[in-house]
Image (cartoon, rainbow, N blue to C red):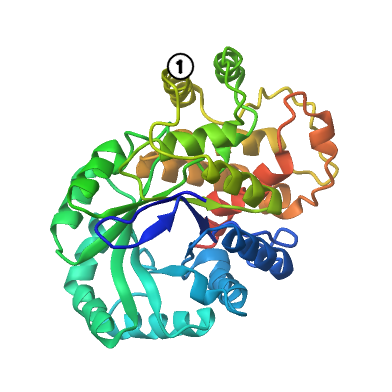
Amino acid sequence: MQYRNFGGLDWKVSALGFGAMRLPVSGADHGNINETAAIRMIRYAIDHGVNYVDTAYPYHRGNSERVVGKALQDGYREKVKLATKMPMMARELVKSQADLEKIFNEQLSRLQTDKINFYLFHALNKESWNRMQDMNALQWAENKLVEGKIDYMGFSFHDEYEVFKEIVDGYEGWTFCQILYNYVDMKQQAGVRGLKYAASKDLAVVVMEPIAGGRLAVKPPSEVQAIWDKAESKRTLADLALQWVWNHREVSIVLSGMSTMQHVIENVESANSSGPGILTDEELNLISRVGEKYREHGFIGCSDCGYCQPCPEGVEIPKILAFINEFHKGRGDHEIRQKVVEQYLETISREKGVEKCVKCGECEEKCPQQLPISKLIEETHFMFERRRNE
């Protein structure tokens, strides 16, 4: 495993961190984690050098923290730094310091620990940053630092660069930040400007979504594939995406949300060969061109041929894939994404959506693009279905 500086701390972090947002699940219920598989994956990563595990209060409907807590028993807790997050995006849950205290204590219980090494205020934007200040949340967190319940404070971020800079400059106690960053979204949200600004302030930068939620690892649209076909490199698509992020000296660690043991094995292998300056000029040029095409055409290589239809369970596969593509094309623009969500909920009924998919694989056998349709359909829960009852 390669290790990198973590901002201004006298501590080296593994190039790869285990992100516990996409743990393996049983069936279509996102909250029903396959605990045996998840614990095995987390421990494999730690055994192979990963020393940073990241989770959050809402992941897998709260079960991510619980399973991570189980995985870190039997001596594994002492081998890693643990990160979790206060759900600032949940206005109905976090209204006061009393709420902060209640949630924090629940997290300690779930994680079976008496301390959180790296604690983040989750998914900050302009609105939640203002609410934090109104409830004096930073003072609450500083009290936890004094009590020894938190080692270091940081935040994850989803808004524009100007807001990111305001938050970085708005508090001197930050140790680290977590931002979305990949070769498609390098100018979205905090982006490359935020990466460099945070590093200039000696903050560690934790990168999430390095493979764009897995989108950069699936078979791409034909326009993108035509560019990749010219590559001399034998790297996999996932490895190229990860290496592009690790190529930046300002990046401290890359989080990957891994759903299978194979993901863990491959990502550990990629991390072992990572480092600033690893990619050649030819590879960087190719990735730049691919990024432009993705921004133009989207992530999903579905040609709407209809070969996957009819689905035995009635799932409207091509329509759902089209919505997924539009959702991802709107990365960095909340209004566009919200409109896509609303259109999905109006168009795709519960009877024809993700809950009806039984992962029979018939559609994948028929798909000429060889798309991982079952996985894509399942992931609509993250983007659409969880909003149906909001």
Residue 66 as seen in the image, left or right of residue 29 = left
**In this rendering, is residue 364 above or below 306?**
below
**In this rendering, is residue 7 above or below 326?**
below
At a point 45% along the width and 27% down the height, the residue shown is 279
Residue 191 as seen in the image, left or right of residue 348 = left
Give the quadrant of residue 217. Answer: top right
**In this rendering, is residue 273 above or below 124?**
above
Residue 332 picture location, percent across and down = 36, 40
**Residue 92 makes an appearance in the image:** no
At a point 42% along the width and 32% down the height, the residue shown is 183
Give the quadrant of residue 90. Answer: bottom left
Camera-nearest residue between 81 and 320: 81
Instruction: Please state the total of marks drawn on the protein image.
Output: 1
Residue 45 as seen in the image, left or right of residue 290 = right
Residue 103 picture location, percent across and down = 41, 80
At a point 70% along the width and 48% down the height, the residue shown is 262
Camera-nearest residue between 223 and 20: 20
Mark 1, Cα crowd under 10 Å, few <14 / some 14-19 / many 20+, is few
Mark 1 residue type = Glu
Camera-nearest residue between 376 and 341: 376
At a point 50% along the width and 35% down the height, the residue shown is 241
Residue 66 as seen in the image, left or right of residue 338 = right
Residue 350 picture location, percent across and down = 67, 53
Residue 104 picture location, percent across and down = 39, 81
SS category of the residue bearing label 1: helix
Residue at which label 1 appears: 282
